[in-house]
Image (cartoon, grey):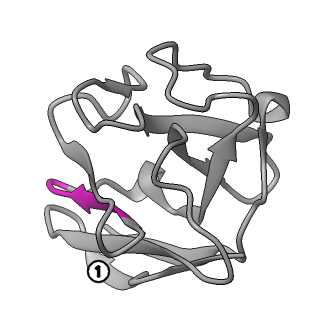
Amino acid sequence: QLQACGGGLVQAGGSLRLSCVASGGTFSMYNMGWFRRAPGKEREFVAAITWSGRSTYYADSVKGRFTISRDNAKNTVSLQMFSLKPEDTAAYYCAVQKGSFQSNYVRRMAYEYHYWGQGTEVTVSS
């Protein structure tokens, strides 16, 4: 199971660090992704990282502001968010990319992920 945490209320321009912790299993050999769902909108891709941590990918809307990383020894994936904007307000979820055992190919569509954890809410005030 995955559990995301670290969300909260922050002013525009502020920063937050989200963490995704795996329990009851290990996902260290799988690609991991962060997605978000804003009120009234579809879930959208935010960032992903390969199982080795060597490659990272970002949505254009967060590129240069967010950084995804992982610590396989601790079974965690993090999303450091800087320069937050009101449009970043959403529930953030982490998930495991299907069939990505030791894969260097990252997918960006939500249906290509599973083991969705409970989300963590991020609210950015203007």
When asked about the image quadrant of residue 7, the answer is bottom left
Residue 45: percent from left, percent from top: 58, 34
Between 43 and 118, the one lying in front of the other is 118
Residue at figure coordinates x 27%, y 38% from the top left: 53
Residue 48: percent from left, percent from top: 44, 35
Between 102 and 34, the one lying in front of the other is 102
Residue at figure coordinates x 65%, y 47% from the top left: 96
In the rendered view, does 62 fall on the left or right side of 35?
A: left
Residue 23: percent from left, percent from top: 61, 83
Quarter in which the N terminus is drawn: bottom right
**What is the secondary structure assignment of the residue under circle 1?**
strand
In the rendered view, does 103 fall on the left or right side of 79?
A: right
Between 88 and 5, the one lying in front of the other is 5
Crowding near the residue tagged with mark 1, few <14, some 14–19, many ≥20 C-alpha atoms within 10 Å? some
Quarter in which the C terminus is drawn: bottom left
Residue at figure coordinates x 52%, y 19% from the top left: 106
When asked about the image quadrant of residue 90, the answer is bottom right
When asked about the image quadrant of residue 49, the answer is top left
Residue 2: percent from left, percent from top: 64, 73
The answer to whether residue 116 is above or below residue 102 is below
Residue 33 within the segment the image draws in magenta: no
First to last magenta residue range: 77-83
Residue 80 within the segment the image draws in magenta: yes
The answer to whether residue 2 is above or below residue 94 is below
Residue at figure coordinates x 29%, y 80% from the top left: 10
Report the number of numbered marks: 1
Residue type at tag 1: Val
Which residue corresponds to mark 1? 10
The answer to whether residue 92 is above or below residue 35 is below
In the rendered view, does 64 fall on the left or right side of 23?
A: left
